[in-house]
Image: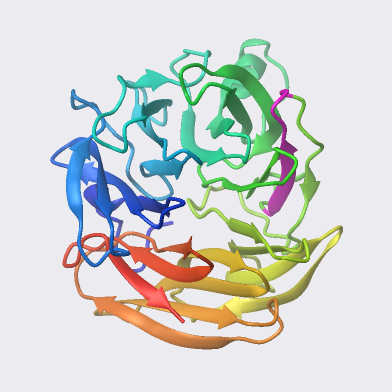
Amino acid sequence: MPAKDGAVRPDLGATAAFDAQGVLWAAHKDGGYIAVSRSDDAGRSWAGPVRVNAVIEPTDMGADSRPKIAVGAGGELYVTWTRPLGKPFTGEIRFARSLDGGRSFSTPVTVHSDRQEITHRFDAIAVNDKGQLFVAWIDKRDGVAAAKAKGPAYQGAAVYYAVSDDKGASFRGDYKLAEHSCECCRIALRTQDDGSVLAMWRHVFTPNIRDHALARLTPDGKPGVARRVTFDDWRVDVCPHHGPSLDMDAAGRLHAVWFTQAPKHSGIFYGRLRDGAVDAQRRVGGETAEHADLAVSGNRVAVAWKEFDGERSRLRAMISDDGGDSWRERELATTAEASDHPRVLLRGGAFQVFWNTRREPLLTVALQ
């Protein structure tokens, strides 16, 4: 489902992350290459970009797909992206790392061991406190196997992941997290104190309900059981290219934002996730609100999204100081040019919103 102001331009997909020293790193496209830029002043100025891949290769940059960046405790930089293959909707997850503070990157490798020309797309990346690196993606191998066996039609795709214990020098997997995921929505990851990683994704529940599921990725490749966590009952046979965002507060409560077009709930929604229900569910923004992101600091919650008013895209945000019970809203920026989807970042407990636009590349706005 395209954005109200047209499709996101392929060169604007970007993500960013702060390291432990407060340096901001952004992964984006630069002249056909995947690149990383550095800011020492929270995005007011940028150094770089440094090319991640020495040889240009095709890159999936549309909708929920874009380069991803994660930072290790020792300042290691990890970058993933999806490289399209020859057939429609196929791809493979690519990875490169920097161990020298972003001055150079390793030769890119493909993360997963399965090399069929099928869907391995919509990568997500996270690093736990032990330094283990998790990469998850949407995968169609089970659907291909079902078709070859001439069995029942396979619903959707699946979520797989791989783990690296040596700072990205090698990966082990491929581990299946869950079958019957939606085919083209981004995956949200959130690390846990025990070294596991929570994943939230759009799932295909019987018969054709595209709500969301949650499960735990573990380093040993034995994931937890997937459970349903949103209950809008959206019955549809298409993929909306519109994945969720997930974080946890100081009390251990899970906060999320997601998109749905169910009859009773249509638009972007926020809620606190618990077994069998959603607490404090509320609409985010107006009718054109899209691609929200969320972060939590202590008991404070911040959500950012963009809306199109027919002429301009408006970057908007809302903040809660009481764990999602009450909110205040504000507008952060506008543009009449093309723009990517916003990201909410944390720097020393303070919120920053990252938004890559054609007019103001790698824009970063403090959110009080």
The answer to whether residue 219 is above or below residue 35 is above
Residue under the point 40% across and 68% down: 353
Is residue 208 shown left or right of residue 276? left
Question: In the image, is residue 236 part of the stretch drawn in magenta?
Answer: no
Q: How is the image coloured?
A: rainbow
Q: Nearer the viewer, residue 340 or 297?
A: 297
Q: Position of residue 276 (x, y in %)?
A: 86, 59
Q: Nearer the viewer, residue 49 or 68?
A: 49
Q: Position of residue 188 (x, y in %)?
A: 58, 49
The answer to whether residue 64 is above or below residue 311 is above
The answer to whether residue 277 is above or below residue 203 is below
Residue under the point 28% across and 58% down: 40
Residue under the point 51% across and 39% down: 125
The answer to whether residue 298 is above or below residue 54 is below
Q: Position of residue 25 (x, y in %)?
A: 34, 50
Is residue 10 shown left or right of residue 200? left
- Residue 294 position by quadrant: bottom right
The quadrant of the image that shows the N terminus is bottom left
Q: Which residues are magenta?
A: 211-221
- Residue 270 position by quadrant: bottom right
Residue under the point 34% across and 28% down: 84
Q: Nearer the viewer, residue 38 or 291?
A: 38
- Residue 238 visible in this rendered orientation of the protein: yes
Question: In the image, is residue 215 part of the stretch drawn in magenta?
Answer: yes
Q: Nearer the viewer, residue 170 or 62?
A: 170
Q: Residue furthest right?
A: 276
